Amino acid sequence: MPSPSPSPQTIVDTLLGVAAIFITPDWRALILLIPIGLALLFIAWFAFTVRKFATVGPNRRAPARVQPVTPANVHMPGGSSAPILVASGAGALFLGLVLGGVWLWVGVAVLVVTMLAWGREALRDYDHLESTQRLPAVIHEGPPPGVHMPGPSIRPLLGALGSAALLGGLVVGGWVLILAIVFLVYTLIGWLIDATAEYRKTVEADRTGHLENIPARRLPTRTLQVFAVLFVLIGLNQMGVFPPASPASGGTPGASAAPSGGPPIPAGALPVVAKGIAFDVKTLEVAADKPFTLYLENQDPATTPHDIEIRSTSGTKIQGQPPTSGGKATAYQGNALKAGTYTFICSIHPIAGMTGTLTVK
């Protein structure tokens, strides 16, 4: 018997099911197909690019390959492996930065050797260059009327030195910071004096029609030497190195005197000594979920305060205490911390010498 024909309702349901695929698709399945579509698109683009490069140029080749000839007075160096070697040296340096220790120096040595090899190869190429003909010197008649061209100036260099000294003083603090501010003000005042003199020359040129630059300023070598000596002496004095302290009677020469102020060391406190803008310990360990005490002895001069701040490994401040002046001592009460690794650091001098690891377990 012939199979019964589908009813109109069945046909309608089938059409609705097919339309539902396009009207309300399965978005999750479509999203999962996106990487496949991108891969197919990339394959198509790659195939098109390969075909394009394969068919570029003339379709008919010459009977023999023509050897290119370098034009006269043009030096064409051959292939070189030096860039690859220097890239390998840079990779060794980064690996040494990660591993640390002796591997850092190994990476530096590898990079230096590869760069020297590249430099030797570049000098060999340079020796092959033909000497160029020197053109006659061009004598400029000067700027157009009404245009003032100031001569070279050392003031930007001195201003940069003053800014660098200020940044260093902000890190070290104390009298070094005050001297850095004085040096920066000295450089800025000199710059202002030159700028004022140049402005007066332009005003005079507008009146007389004669344009003249201010005299060239020489590098103040003597003044820079004086500031350099002062920075060294004040820095050594601030670190307690200069002048050398005379040993106390009955004491051991070179021993550091105990702080004159501050509470006695509490029982169970972890001692931390700050001297020469550095902590004497780099690792501390306390119990988890229990308060703890850090006893800070600041053996630096009175003008160099220090503190101990507890931070997370990401650098977020967790606990902090007021600073302790030089020659003083303070017992810092720390709140209970959860188990983990933290950082203790001097927030006034956030340098490597005043940074350590606090382990809580």
Image: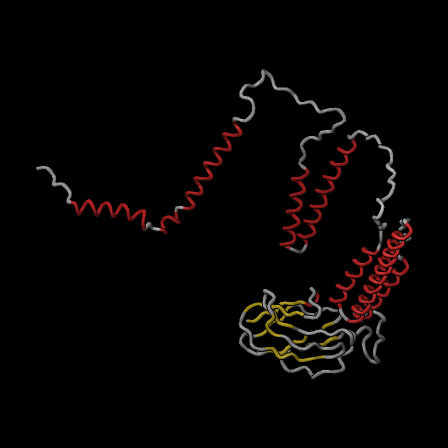
Quadrant of residue 64 within the rendered picture: top right
Q: In the displayed structure, does residue 153 sit left or right of residue 318? A: right
Q: In the displayed structure, does residue 248 sit left or right of residue 113? A: right
Residue 281 locus on image (x, y percent): 68, 69
Quadrant of residue 118 within the rendered picture: top right
Quadrant of residue 58 within the rendered picture: top right
Depicted 3 relative to depicted 256: above or below: above
According to the image, what is the colour scheme of the structure?
secondary structure
> Which of the image's four quarters has the C terminus?
bottom right
Residue 66 locus on image (x, y percent): 63, 19
> Which of the image's four quarters has the N terminus?
top left
Residue 129 locus on image (x, y percent): 78, 30
Depicted 110 relative to depicted 203: above or below: above
- What residue do we see at 87% from left, 41% from top? 141
Depicted 251 relative to depicted 356: above or below: below
Residue closer to the observer: 252 or 166: 166
Residue 47 locus on image (x, y percent): 47, 33
Tally of numbered tags: 0
Depicted 200 relative to depicted 138: above or below: below
In the picture as drawn, the residue positioned furthest to the top comes out as 63
- What residue do we see at 86% from left, 57% from top? 194
In the picture as drawn, the residue positioned furthest to the front comes out as 207
Q: In the displayed structure, does residue 21 sit left or right of residue 5? A: right
Residue closer to the observer: 302 or 266: 302
